[in-house]
Image: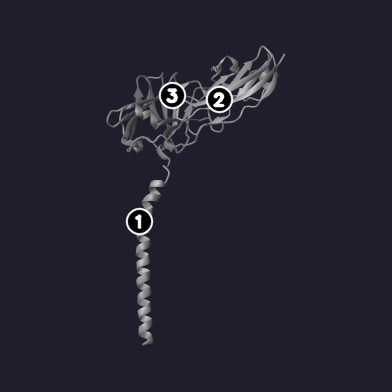
Amino acid sequence: MWLSIELQWRSIRMRCLHFRLIFAVIAICMVAPLMLSAAPAKEVAIFKGDEPEKDSIILGGWGSGAAVQSKEMIFEGGWSIKVTTQGLYSGGRIEFGEPVTLFTDGIDKTRYVQFVLFFNESQIINPAPGFEYAMSDVEPYRKPKASKVRFVFVSDKGQTVEAVEPTVALDQDDNWMRVAVPLEKFKSIPDITEFRMKQLMIFTDSPGTVFLGLMRMVSDTDPIKVDPLDSRTTSILYTEYFVANAAGGVSSLNYAWDFDSSDGILAESTERIAKHTYKTGGDYTVTLTVSDADGIKAPVTVTTVISVTD
């Protein structure tokens, strides 16, 4: 009898365990889609230094420009794409054997196409030359000679989107420049919901050679952040330097300085490192506004007071 009761209890326990397993599987199946949908969009490489020819990428020119695969300058992998440009309408053409999907369910304003570029033609910008450099705390930096990069995206349906982005300072560690085109630019096509890139053209506003080392899709939700400006006391006819320390994720930033708010807020300088000489004594409010070059993120304004002695 006791053996019979024991067997019955074992049977009941096995059935309970069986039902628990079923409920666990059902719960996982219900939660998994929610977890996947809540997961943030990842970086997606479009070109990461693999040999273009083996990836069915066809390179050519637009106008009198050209694009060829190269090992001269490499950012990642073993190859780059060397683009020769003659201006904003003469450059390199990249054609993808398999169209690259940039989006399929409308435009996500947090998504960007980011490019990592090396410019053969660059220059050292020294905001405080000569004697002024020794008296200031600003450092020289390197920047492309070209001031603009023009990208033209062509879909497999023949749709075209153009984006012109300003060049920025090169990374101090590797001398490559990062620039990103927001998918918001694709709203230039009315009611667009998807875009599969078949071709990409790259141009600069001055003749030169540019190497494409990396192209990828990234997400960016970082707002623009600007460090406070220090107040200071100076003398008339003494050149003061003002440095904008700001960050905005992958966005390119614009700077606007006003050195005296009494006559209205004007863009008296648009450099990241600005300089100004006061000719009369008094207290002056200096205003810095940092904005998104593509107009997507909210601008940030900071101020400080400069006391000028006679």
Please say if 279 is above or below 297. above
Which residue is tagged 1?
29
Q: Quote the CA–CA distance across marks 2 and 3.
A: 17 Å
Residue 142 - label: 2
| Amino acid type of the residue tagged 1 in the rendering | Cys
In this view, the mark in front (1 or 2):
1
Q: Residues within 10 Å of mark 2 (few under 14, many from 20)?
A: some
**Residue 117, x across and y down, in percent:** 46, 29
In this view, the mark in front (2 or 3):
3
Dot placed on the residue nearer the N-terminal end, 2 or 3: 2
Residue 126 seen in render: no
| Amino acid type of the residue tagged 3 in the rendering | Val
Which residue is tagged 3?
149
- Residue at image position (43%, 43%) is 40
Q: Nearer the viewer, residue 153 or 172?
A: 153
Residue 59 left/right relative to 131: left
